[in-house]
Image (spheres, coloured by chain):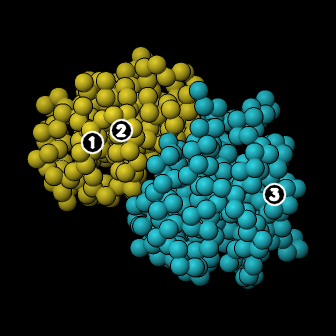
Chain colours: A yellow, B cyan
Amino acid sequence: MKVTLIDYGAGNVPSVERAFRRLGAEVETTNAAEKVATANCLVLPGVGHCAALIHALDAHALRQPILDAIARGATFLGICLGLQALYVSSDEASDKHGLGLLPGKVTRLPATVKLPHMGWNTLQRLRTLRLLESIPTGAYFYFAHSFAAPSGGEECAAVCAHGREFVAVVEKRNLFAVQFHPEKSGAAGAQILQNFLKAAA
Amino acid sequence: MTLAHRIIPCLDTDGSRVVKGVHFEGLRDAGDPVELAARYNAEGADELVVLDIAAARDNRPTFLETIRRVAEQLAIPLAAGGGIRSLEAARAVVRAGADKITVNTAAVERPQLLSELSAEFGAQAVVLAIDAKRDGSHWQVRVRGGREATTLNVEDWARRGVEMGAGEILLTSVDRDGTQSGFDLDLTAAISKAISVPVIASGGAKLPSHFLEVFTKGAADAALAASIFHDQVQSIRSLKEFLRAHQVEVRLPC
Protein backbone atom coordinates (compact mmCIF):
# COMPACT_ATOMS: atom_id res chain seq x y z
CA MET A 1 0.00 0.00 0.00
CA LYS A 2 1.46 3.35 -1.03
CA VAL A 3 0.44 6.30 1.13
CA THR A 4 0.62 9.71 -0.54
CA LEU A 5 1.37 12.17 2.25
CA ILE A 6 0.73 15.81 1.37
CA ASP A 7 3.80 17.77 2.49
CA TYR A 8 3.16 21.50 2.55
CA GLY A 9 5.60 22.12 5.41
CA ALA A 10 3.42 21.08 8.36
CA GLY A 11 5.35 20.23 11.51
CA ASN A 12 4.02 16.71 11.87
CA VAL A 13 4.79 15.37 8.39
CA PRO A 14 7.93 13.47 9.54
CA SER A 15 6.11 11.84 12.47
CA VAL A 16 3.19 10.79 10.28
CA GLU A 17 5.60 9.39 7.72
CA ARG A 18 7.51 7.51 10.42
CA ALA A 19 4.29 6.10 11.88
CA PHE A 20 3.12 4.73 8.51
CA ARG A 21 6.56 3.29 7.73
CA ARG A 22 6.56 1.44 11.05
CA LEU A 23 3.41 -0.30 9.81
CA GLY A 24 5.22 -1.37 6.65
CA ALA A 25 3.53 1.12 4.34
CA GLU A 26 5.35 2.77 1.47
CA VAL A 27 5.12 6.55 1.89
CA GLU A 28 5.48 9.18 -0.80
CA THR A 29 5.65 12.76 0.53
CA THR A 30 4.71 15.33 -2.08
CA ASN A 31 3.25 18.75 -2.76
CA ALA A 32 2.88 18.07 -6.48
CA ALA A 33 -0.69 18.51 -7.75
CA GLU A 34 -0.52 15.64 -10.27
CA LYS A 35 0.67 13.15 -7.64
CA VAL A 36 -2.11 14.21 -5.25
CA ALA A 37 -4.75 14.03 -7.99
CA THR A 38 -3.77 10.47 -8.94
CA ALA A 39 -3.24 9.12 -5.40
CA ASN A 40 -5.25 6.15 -4.16
CA CYS A 41 -4.46 6.60 -0.48
CA LEU A 42 -4.11 10.24 0.48
CA VAL A 43 -3.17 11.75 3.86
CA LEU A 44 -3.43 15.44 4.76
CA PRO A 45 -1.58 16.08 8.03
CA GLY A 46 -1.57 19.37 9.87
CA VAL A 47 -0.76 21.08 13.09
CA GLY A 48 -0.62 24.74 14.02
CA HIS A 49 -2.64 27.45 12.34
CA CYS A 50 -5.51 26.66 9.95
CA ALA A 51 -4.81 29.70 7.76
CA ALA A 52 -1.30 28.36 7.10
CA LEU A 53 -2.72 25.07 5.84
CA ILE A 54 -5.36 26.66 3.58
CA HIS A 55 -2.81 29.14 2.27
CA ALA A 56 -0.35 26.33 1.52
CA LEU A 57 -3.01 24.31 -0.32
CA ASP A 58 -3.75 27.29 -2.53
CA ALA A 59 -0.07 28.21 -2.98
CA HIS A 60 0.65 24.68 -4.27
CA ALA A 61 -2.67 24.53 -6.22
CA LEU A 62 -3.66 21.42 -4.27
CA ARG A 63 -7.29 22.25 -3.52
CA GLN A 64 -8.79 20.82 -6.73
CA PRO A 65 -6.47 17.78 -6.89
CA ILE A 66 -7.54 16.80 -3.35
CA LEU A 67 -11.22 17.22 -4.21
CA ASP A 68 -10.72 15.26 -7.45
CA ALA A 69 -8.94 12.41 -5.68
CA ILE A 70 -11.69 12.12 -3.05
CA ALA A 71 -14.45 12.33 -5.71
CA ARG A 72 -12.67 9.57 -7.65
CA GLY A 73 -12.81 7.37 -4.56
CA ALA A 74 -9.29 7.70 -3.14
CA THR A 75 -9.21 6.77 0.54
CA PHE A 76 -8.47 10.00 2.40
CA LEU A 77 -7.29 10.67 5.95
CA GLY A 78 -7.19 14.18 7.41
CA ILE A 79 -5.28 14.67 10.66
CA CYS A 80 -5.98 17.58 13.06
CA LEU A 81 -6.04 20.64 10.74
CA GLY A 82 -6.49 18.10 7.95
CA LEU A 83 -9.91 17.39 9.49
CA GLN A 84 -10.77 21.05 10.03
CA ALA A 85 -9.88 21.93 6.42
CA LEU A 86 -12.68 19.63 5.18
CA TYR A 87 -15.37 21.99 6.48
CA VAL A 88 -16.82 25.03 4.76
CA SER A 89 -14.87 27.52 6.87
CA SER A 90 -12.97 28.07 10.10
CA ASP A 91 -13.05 31.02 12.49
CA GLU A 92 -9.27 30.63 12.69
CA ALA A 93 -9.02 31.59 9.01
CA SER A 94 -12.23 33.53 8.47
CA ASP A 95 -11.09 35.20 5.25
CA LYS A 96 -10.50 31.84 3.56
CA HIS A 97 -12.71 28.95 2.45
CA GLY A 98 -12.14 25.39 3.55
CA LEU A 99 -12.46 22.46 1.17
CA GLY A 100 -16.21 22.50 1.75
CA LEU A 101 -16.66 18.72 1.71
CA LEU A 102 -18.44 18.82 5.07
CA PRO A 103 -21.09 21.31 6.20
CA GLY A 104 -20.57 23.79 9.00
CA LYS A 105 -17.90 25.95 10.47
CA VAL A 106 -14.91 25.19 12.68
CA THR A 107 -15.03 27.37 15.81
CA ARG A 108 -12.91 28.05 18.88
CA LEU A 109 -13.50 25.90 21.96
CA PRO A 110 -14.99 27.92 24.84
CA ALA A 111 -12.79 30.00 27.13
CA THR A 112 -14.29 28.23 30.17
CA VAL A 113 -11.55 25.58 29.83
CA LYS A 114 -7.79 25.75 29.34
CA LEU A 115 -6.75 26.06 25.72
CA PRO A 116 -5.16 24.55 23.76
CA HIS A 117 -6.98 21.27 24.48
CA MET A 118 -3.62 19.60 24.94
CA GLY A 119 -3.04 16.04 25.99
CA TRP A 120 -4.76 12.67 26.09
CA ASN A 121 -8.52 12.25 25.95
CA THR A 122 -11.04 9.51 25.20
CA LEU A 123 -13.76 9.29 22.54
CA GLN A 124 -17.46 8.59 22.49
CA ARG A 125 -18.33 6.45 19.49
CA LEU A 126 -21.65 7.24 17.84
CA ARG A 127 -21.64 4.12 15.66
CA THR A 128 -19.37 1.26 14.67
CA LEU A 129 -16.26 2.77 13.16
CA ARG A 130 -13.83 1.25 10.73
CA LEU A 131 -11.02 3.45 12.06
CA LEU A 132 -11.60 2.29 15.65
CA GLU A 133 -11.84 -1.42 14.88
CA SER A 134 -10.15 -3.58 17.58
CA ILE A 135 -9.35 -0.49 19.70
CA PRO A 136 -10.78 -0.81 23.23
CA THR A 137 -13.43 1.65 24.36
CA GLY A 138 -11.73 4.03 26.75
CA ALA A 139 -8.50 4.21 24.73
CA TYR A 140 -6.79 7.60 24.91
CA PHE A 141 -5.66 9.72 21.97
CA TYR A 142 -3.39 12.77 21.88
CA PHE A 143 -5.02 16.12 21.06
CA ALA A 144 -3.38 19.53 20.57
CA HIS A 145 -5.85 22.13 19.25
CA SER A 146 -7.97 25.15 20.20
CA PHE A 147 -10.48 25.05 17.33
CA ALA A 148 -12.85 22.19 16.53
CA ALA A 149 -15.64 21.12 14.19
CA PRO A 150 -19.32 21.02 15.23
CA SER A 151 -20.72 17.62 16.18
CA GLY A 152 -24.18 16.55 15.07
CA GLY A 153 -23.70 15.94 11.35
CA GLU A 154 -24.03 12.48 9.77
CA GLU A 155 -20.29 12.50 8.97
CA CYS A 156 -19.45 12.69 12.68
CA ALA A 157 -18.67 9.15 13.84
CA ALA A 158 -17.13 9.85 17.25
CA VAL A 159 -16.99 12.88 19.50
CA CYS A 160 -14.77 14.21 22.25
CA ALA A 161 -15.49 17.06 24.67
CA HIS A 162 -13.45 19.89 26.13
CA GLY A 163 -15.62 22.82 27.14
CA ARG A 164 -18.08 21.56 24.52
CA GLU A 165 -18.61 18.49 22.40
CA PHE A 166 -16.77 18.40 19.07
CA VAL A 167 -16.03 16.06 16.18
CA ALA A 168 -13.19 13.66 16.98
CA VAL A 169 -13.60 11.22 14.07
CA VAL A 170 -15.15 11.68 10.63
CA GLU A 171 -16.11 8.65 8.56
CA LYS A 172 -18.04 9.13 5.35
CA ARG A 173 -17.47 6.47 2.68
CA ASN A 174 -13.83 6.97 1.57
CA LEU A 175 -13.44 10.11 3.66
CA PHE A 176 -11.75 9.68 7.07
CA ALA A 177 -10.48 12.34 9.44
CA VAL A 178 -9.39 12.61 13.08
CA GLN A 179 -8.99 15.67 15.28
CA PHE A 180 -6.32 13.97 17.41
CA HIS A 181 -2.82 12.90 16.31
CA PRO A 182 -2.71 9.15 15.68
CA GLU A 183 1.02 9.46 14.94
CA LYS A 184 1.50 10.61 18.57
CA SER A 185 -1.11 8.41 20.22
CA GLY A 186 0.91 5.33 21.13
CA ALA A 187 -0.39 1.87 20.25
CA ALA A 188 -4.01 3.02 19.85
CA GLY A 189 -2.90 5.62 17.33
CA ALA A 190 -0.88 3.07 15.37
CA GLN A 191 -4.01 0.88 15.20
CA ILE A 192 -5.98 3.81 13.73
CA LEU A 193 -3.41 4.14 10.95
CA GLN A 194 -3.44 0.39 10.44
CA ASN A 195 -7.23 0.43 10.15
CA PHE A 196 -6.98 3.28 7.64
CA LEU A 197 -4.53 1.25 5.53
CA LYS A 198 -6.96 -1.66 5.66
CA ALA A 199 -9.83 0.57 4.50
CA ALA A 200 -7.64 1.77 1.63
CA ALA A 201 -6.56 -1.73 0.56
CA MET B 1 -14.08 12.30 27.96
CA THR B 2 -11.98 14.11 30.52
CA LEU B 3 -8.54 15.34 29.60
CA ALA B 4 -6.00 13.16 31.40
CA HIS B 5 -3.30 14.61 33.65
CA ARG B 6 0.04 14.02 31.97
CA ILE B 7 3.19 12.46 33.42
CA ILE B 8 6.27 13.73 31.59
CA PRO B 9 9.80 12.41 32.07
CA CYS B 10 12.53 14.92 31.31
CA LEU B 11 15.91 14.08 29.81
CA ASP B 12 18.52 16.72 30.65
CA THR B 13 21.35 16.12 28.21
CA ASP B 14 24.82 17.50 27.56
CA GLY B 15 23.90 17.14 23.89
CA SER B 16 24.37 13.39 23.58
CA ARG B 17 24.11 11.82 27.05
CA VAL B 18 21.52 12.21 29.80
CA VAL B 19 23.12 13.95 32.77
CA LYS B 20 22.10 14.53 36.35
CA GLY B 21 23.07 17.28 38.71
CA VAL B 22 21.55 20.56 39.62
CA HIS B 23 22.47 23.51 37.43
CA PHE B 24 25.65 22.27 35.83
CA GLU B 25 27.21 21.29 39.15
CA GLY B 26 28.33 17.75 39.81
CA LEU B 27 26.99 16.46 36.50
CA ARG B 28 27.06 12.74 36.17
CA ASP B 29 26.06 10.40 33.40
CA ALA B 30 22.54 9.02 33.79
CA GLY B 31 22.21 7.06 30.61
CA ASP B 32 21.56 6.98 26.90
CA PRO B 33 18.69 9.28 25.82
CA VAL B 34 17.59 6.88 23.08
CA GLU B 35 17.34 3.92 25.48
CA LEU B 36 15.51 5.99 28.08
CA ALA B 37 13.12 7.40 25.48
CA ALA B 38 12.23 3.90 24.29
CA ARG B 39 11.65 2.78 27.87
CA TYR B 40 9.39 5.73 28.74
CA ASN B 41 7.45 5.37 25.50
CA ALA B 42 6.77 1.71 26.39
CA GLU B 43 5.99 2.42 30.07
CA GLY B 44 3.21 4.86 29.32
CA ALA B 45 4.81 8.31 29.56
CA ASP B 46 2.41 10.86 28.08
CA GLU B 47 5.07 13.04 26.56
CA LEU B 48 8.85 13.45 26.70
CA VAL B 49 10.94 16.57 27.23
CA VAL B 50 14.56 16.62 26.06
CA LEU B 51 16.71 19.55 27.07
CA ASP B 52 20.23 20.51 26.08
CA ILE B 53 21.54 21.94 29.34
CA ALA B 54 24.97 22.55 27.83
CA ALA B 55 23.47 24.54 24.98
CA ALA B 56 25.90 27.41 25.36
CA ARG B 57 28.71 25.09 24.38
CA ASP B 58 29.49 23.97 20.85
CA ASN B 59 27.34 20.88 20.54
CA ARG B 60 24.33 21.90 18.49
CA PRO B 61 24.64 19.28 15.73
CA THR B 62 25.05 16.60 18.41
CA PHE B 63 21.83 17.67 20.13
CA LEU B 64 19.89 17.71 16.86
CA GLU B 65 21.12 14.19 16.15
CA THR B 66 19.97 13.19 19.66
CA ILE B 67 16.49 14.62 18.96
CA ARG B 68 16.35 12.70 15.69
CA ARG B 69 17.30 9.44 17.37
CA VAL B 70 14.92 10.00 20.29
CA ALA B 71 12.02 10.90 17.95
CA GLU B 72 12.57 7.62 16.09
CA GLN B 73 11.66 5.79 19.31
CA LEU B 74 8.52 7.70 20.17
CA ALA B 75 4.81 7.36 19.47
CA ILE B 76 4.13 10.17 21.97
CA PRO B 77 4.80 13.91 21.73
CA LEU B 78 8.32 15.27 22.11
CA ALA B 79 9.24 18.72 23.40
CA ALA B 80 12.82 19.89 22.99
CA GLY B 81 14.75 22.93 24.10
CA GLY B 82 17.83 24.45 25.58
CA GLY B 83 19.51 27.42 23.97
CA ILE B 84 16.90 28.05 21.27
CA ARG B 85 17.24 31.79 20.57
CA SER B 86 15.86 32.15 17.05
CA LEU B 87 13.19 30.93 14.67
CA GLU B 88 15.93 29.31 12.62
CA ALA B 89 17.20 27.29 15.60
CA ALA B 90 13.62 26.25 16.40
CA ARG B 91 13.03 25.11 12.82
CA ALA B 92 16.08 22.84 13.05
CA VAL B 93 14.70 21.28 16.25
CA VAL B 94 11.24 20.76 14.73
CA ARG B 95 12.74 19.31 11.54
CA ALA B 96 14.73 16.92 13.72
CA GLY B 97 11.44 15.58 15.11
CA ALA B 98 10.29 17.74 18.04
CA ASP B 99 6.56 18.55 18.28
CA LYS B 100 7.10 21.41 20.71
CA ILE B 101 9.82 23.94 21.36
CA THR B 102 10.78 24.89 24.89
CA VAL B 103 12.26 28.35 25.47
CA ASN B 104 13.34 30.01 28.69
CA THR B 105 16.11 32.63 28.98
CA ALA B 106 15.88 33.67 25.33
CA ALA B 107 12.19 34.54 25.75
CA VAL B 108 12.93 36.66 28.82
CA GLU B 109 15.55 38.55 26.85
CA ARG B 110 13.39 38.88 23.74
CA PRO B 111 9.67 38.08 24.34
CA GLN B 112 8.98 38.60 20.61
CA LEU B 113 10.57 35.17 20.11
CA LEU B 114 7.35 33.64 21.53
CA SER B 115 5.23 35.40 18.90
CA GLU B 116 7.57 34.35 16.11
CA LEU B 117 7.46 30.71 17.20
CA SER B 118 3.70 30.77 17.70
CA ALA B 119 3.07 32.31 14.27
CA GLU B 120 5.20 29.65 12.58
CA PHE B 121 4.37 26.49 14.54
CA GLY B 122 1.12 27.33 16.39
CA ALA B 123 0.70 28.06 20.11
CA GLN B 124 0.38 24.33 20.87
CA ALA B 125 4.05 23.94 19.88
CA VAL B 126 5.40 26.74 22.09
CA VAL B 127 6.31 25.89 25.67
CA LEU B 128 7.50 28.75 27.85
CA ALA B 129 9.73 27.36 30.59
CA ILE B 130 9.85 29.55 33.69
CA ASP B 131 12.26 29.01 36.57
CA ALA B 132 10.62 30.45 39.70
CA LYS B 133 12.24 31.33 43.01
CA ARG B 134 10.22 32.36 46.02
CA ASP B 135 10.72 35.97 47.04
CA GLY B 136 8.53 36.84 50.04
CA SER B 137 4.89 36.43 49.08
CA HIS B 138 5.51 36.01 45.36
CA TRP B 139 7.95 34.38 42.95
CA GLN B 140 10.77 35.85 40.94
CA VAL B 141 11.78 34.67 37.45
CA ARG B 142 15.31 33.27 37.29
CA VAL B 143 17.28 32.69 34.08
CA ARG B 144 20.40 30.83 32.91
CA GLY B 145 19.50 27.56 34.54
CA GLY B 146 18.11 29.28 37.63
CA ARG B 147 21.40 30.97 38.51
CA GLU B 148 20.59 34.53 37.55
CA ALA B 149 17.90 36.76 39.06
CA THR B 150 15.61 39.01 37.02
CA THR B 151 13.17 41.73 38.05
CA LEU B 152 10.22 39.80 36.58
CA ASN B 153 7.38 38.47 38.69
CA VAL B 154 6.47 34.90 37.67
CA GLU B 155 2.71 35.49 37.45
CA ASP B 156 3.16 38.64 35.33
CA TRP B 157 5.67 36.91 33.06
CA ALA B 158 3.44 33.83 32.63
CA ARG B 159 0.48 36.04 31.62
CA ARG B 160 2.64 38.03 29.23
CA GLY B 161 4.11 34.85 27.77
CA VAL B 162 0.63 33.50 27.02
CA GLU B 163 -0.35 36.82 25.41
CA MET B 164 2.79 36.61 23.26
CA GLY B 165 1.90 33.14 22.03
CA ALA B 166 2.99 30.45 24.49
CA GLY B 167 0.56 27.51 24.50
CA GLU B 168 1.87 25.94 27.67
CA ILE B 169 3.95 26.88 30.72
CA LEU B 170 6.65 24.57 32.09
CA LEU B 171 6.94 25.88 35.63
CA THR B 172 9.99 24.83 37.67
CA SER B 173 10.45 25.66 41.32
CA VAL B 174 14.13 26.51 41.72
CA ASP B 175 13.64 26.13 45.49
CA ARG B 176 12.37 22.56 45.17
CA ASP B 177 14.42 21.37 42.18
CA GLY B 178 16.60 18.44 43.18
CA THR B 179 15.28 18.31 46.76
CA GLN B 180 12.74 15.48 46.21
CA SER B 181 10.60 17.17 48.89
CA GLY B 182 7.52 17.60 46.69
CA PHE B 183 6.32 20.15 44.15
CA ASP B 184 5.76 23.76 45.21
CA LEU B 185 1.96 23.57 45.43
CA ASP B 186 1.40 27.26 46.19
CA LEU B 187 3.45 28.33 43.17
CA THR B 188 1.79 25.82 40.84
CA ALA B 189 -1.75 26.65 41.95
CA ALA B 190 -1.16 30.40 41.77
CA ILE B 191 0.13 30.27 38.20
CA SER B 192 -2.22 27.55 36.96
CA LYS B 193 -5.24 29.54 38.14
CA ALA B 194 -3.91 32.82 36.74
CA ILE B 195 -3.45 31.72 33.13
CA SER B 196 -5.58 30.16 30.39
CA VAL B 197 -3.10 27.57 29.08
CA PRO B 198 -1.94 24.25 30.58
CA VAL B 199 0.76 24.26 33.28
CA ILE B 200 3.41 21.55 33.66
CA ALA B 201 4.67 21.45 37.25
CA SER B 202 8.34 20.68 37.78
CA GLY B 203 10.86 20.49 40.60
CA GLY B 204 10.86 18.41 43.75
CA ALA B 205 9.01 15.22 42.79
CA LYS B 206 9.73 11.94 44.46
CA LEU B 207 6.68 10.20 45.92
CA PRO B 208 3.40 9.29 44.21
CA SER B 209 1.68 11.52 46.80
CA HIS B 210 3.68 14.48 45.46
CA PHE B 211 2.05 13.96 42.06
CA LEU B 212 -1.39 13.50 43.59
CA GLU B 213 -1.03 16.80 45.49
CA VAL B 214 0.19 18.76 42.50
CA PHE B 215 -2.78 17.61 40.38
CA THR B 216 -5.32 18.33 43.14
CA LYS B 217 -4.09 21.17 45.39
CA GLY B 218 -1.61 22.45 42.78
CA ALA B 219 -4.16 22.43 39.89
CA ALA B 220 -1.40 21.27 37.52
CA ASP B 221 -2.31 19.90 34.10
CA ALA B 222 0.88 17.87 33.84
CA ALA B 223 3.84 16.99 36.04
CA LEU B 224 7.46 16.55 35.07
CA ALA B 225 10.29 14.68 36.76
CA ALA B 226 13.70 13.35 35.79
CA SER B 227 15.93 11.37 38.12
CA ILE B 228 13.20 9.43 39.96
CA PHE B 229 12.25 7.92 36.60
CA HIS B 230 15.82 7.48 35.31
CA ASP B 231 16.92 5.75 38.52
CA GLN B 232 13.74 3.67 38.61
CA VAL B 233 12.83 5.02 42.04
CA GLN B 234 9.36 5.44 40.54
CA SER B 235 7.81 3.54 37.65
CA ILE B 236 5.41 5.49 35.45
CA ARG B 237 2.87 2.69 35.35
CA SER B 238 2.65 2.24 39.13
CA LEU B 239 2.52 6.02 39.57
CA LYS B 240 -0.45 6.19 37.20
CA GLU B 241 -2.17 3.28 38.92
CA PHE B 242 -1.78 5.13 42.23
CA LEU B 243 -3.23 8.32 40.75
CA ARG B 244 -6.16 6.50 39.17
CA ALA B 245 -6.90 4.80 42.51
CA HIS B 246 -7.12 8.33 43.94
CA GLN B 247 -9.60 9.47 41.28
CA VAL B 248 -7.12 11.45 39.21
CA GLU B 249 -7.76 11.00 35.48
CA VAL B 250 -4.67 9.48 33.86
CA ARG B 251 -4.02 7.48 30.71
CA LEU B 252 -3.19 3.86 31.39
CA PRO B 253 -1.98 2.45 28.06
CA CYS B 254 -3.98 -0.57 26.90
Counting from the top left corner in percent of width and height, residue A89 is at: 31, 47
In the image, A71 versus B99, the foreground residue is B99
Q: Quadrant of the C terminus of chain A?
A: top left
Residue visible at 21% across and 51% down?
Answer: A30
Labels 2 and 1 touching (C-beta < 8 A): yes
Residue at image mark 1 = A27
- Marks 3 and 2 sit apart, C-alpha to C-alpha, by 39 Å
Counting from the top left corner in percent of width and height, residue B113 is at: 50, 75
| Residues at discs 3 and 2 both on one chain | no
Residue visible at 41% across and 16% down?
Answer: A128
- Picture quarter containing residue A18? top left
Q: Residue furthest top?
A: A128
- Marks 2 and 1 sit apart, C-alpha to C-alpha, by 7 Å
Type of the residue with mark 1: Val
Q: Quadrant of the N terminus of chain A?
A: top left
**Chain ID of residue with mark 2:** A
Circle 2 crowding by C-alpha within 10 Å: few under 14, some 14–19, many from 20: many
One can see residue A84 in this view: no
Tell me the mark number nearer the camera, choosing from 1 and 3. Answer: 1
Residue at image mark 2 = A20
One can see residue B150 in this view: yes
Ranked by sequence position, the earlier of labels 2 and 1 is 2
Type of the residue with mark 2: Phe
Labels 1 and 3 touching (C-beta < 8 A): no
Residue at image mark 3 = B204
- Picture quarter containing residue A158? top left
**Chain ID of residue with mark 1:** A
Counting from the top left corner in percent of width and height, residue A50 is at: 36, 53
Counting from the top left corner in percent of width and height, residue B120 is at: 40, 65
